[in-house]
Image (cartoon, grey):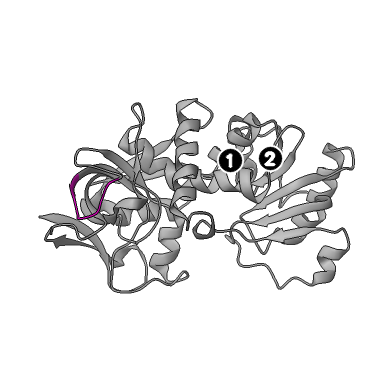
Amino acid sequence: MAEAIWLSRAGDADVLELKRIEPSDPGPGEAWVEQEAVGVNYLDVMQRRGSVPIPLSGGLGLEGAGRVTAVGPGVTNVAVGDRVGYALGPIGSYASGRHYPASQLVKLPDGISTEDAAAILFKGITAQYLIKSTYLVGPGTTILLYGAPGGLGQLLAPWAKHLGARILGGVSKEASVGPAPSAGCDEVLVWGACDLPSEVARLTDRRKVDVVYDGVGKETFNASIDSLRARGMMVSIGASSGLPDPVSIATLNKNSLFLTRPGLAAHATDVEEYRGRAHDVLDAVRQGIIMPSISRTFALAEAAQAHRALEQGGVGRSLIPKP
């Protein structure tokens, strides 16, 4: 008998219920994964609340890792006994075991634990495409990154630093200034307490930054736009303060700016592309460029507590429920 977290309706963390499920043989192209760790991401919280709609009733979670214990007809890329991880749908990773499309499983190399994989694949692939596809970061690139001490920022900042970038970190409060340099920031600005574009201009000798990674949204969008150099790129990666207001094309025209709102699905729809990004993440871990960081471990039955801890803030690292 396996167990899974079930969501019958949107709401607060109390809507997460533990449900027993009967394992069955994998179908064509599927594998059964006995999961050893499950990644918790803020997207899960938004889906649970209903702000990002998902089919109900059903499971929750996109990221997990464990061991293959059975494969269905036609599966050739993984075998029984393989240690694997994943960071894509179908939704339902909050489970002790599950069926999963075998083509989307990534074999874990020696030295990468299942906990590490569950903590890093989703955010790591996101960081990877942001600095290697959305904007090609390299020597001399100057970045404005909001939330550097957060889960994504702790991976994006050191990886971008390794590629040769200079990083200006934007944080929302003084208490976050201390952790930001350890995440790789060269300078740290409290965006609610200063004229951010002016400070960015001062720190860059009036040149401003090449690219902004803005996960705040409504409250910082205009300051982010004004912090970009000519032909710079505004990358909207979140909306913790709400969605930005609609943007007039004239806003971009005044300095020939680029604006994008990238998402994981568009960078991982092709299975080979997805696997390539995942292997790049795991290789960066192996080289010590980025590091999985787990703040707390919960039992699967404590998924609601993991969500509450994430919602309360101050948790920049991954929270891992263990089945």
Total numbered badges shown on the rendered structure: 2
Alpha-carbon span between mark 2 and mark 1: 11 Å
Is 104 positioned to the left or the right of 299 in the image? right
The residue indicated by pointer 1 is: 156
Q: Nearer the viewer, mark 2 or mark 1?
A: 2
Compare marks 2 and 1 and give the one earlier in the sequence. Answer: 2
Decide: few, some or many residues near mark 1? Use Cα within 10 Å; few <14, some 14-19, many ≥20: many
Does residue 241 appear in this view? yes
SS for dot 1: helix
Quadrant housing the N terminus: bottom left
Q: Main secondary structure of the magenta part?
A: loop
Is 91 positioned to the left or the right of 231 in the image? left
The amino acid marked with disc number 2 is Val
The x and y percentages for residue 178 are: 61, 34
Query: 43 or 255: which is nearer to us?
Result: 255
Corner quadrant of residue 66? top left
Corner quadrant of residue 45? bottom left
The x and y percentages for residue 58 are: 28, 69
> Eyeballing the image, is 70 above or below 247?
above
Q: Which residues are magenta?
A: 69-76
Say whether residue 115 is magenta.
no
Query: 278 or 103: which is nearer to us?
Result: 103
The x and y percentages for residue 266 are: 53, 59
The residue indicated by pointer 2 is: 137
Corner quadrant of residue 181? top right
Decide: few, some or many residues near mark 2? Use Cα within 10 Å; few <14, some 14-19, many ≥20: many
Does residue 301 appear in this view? no
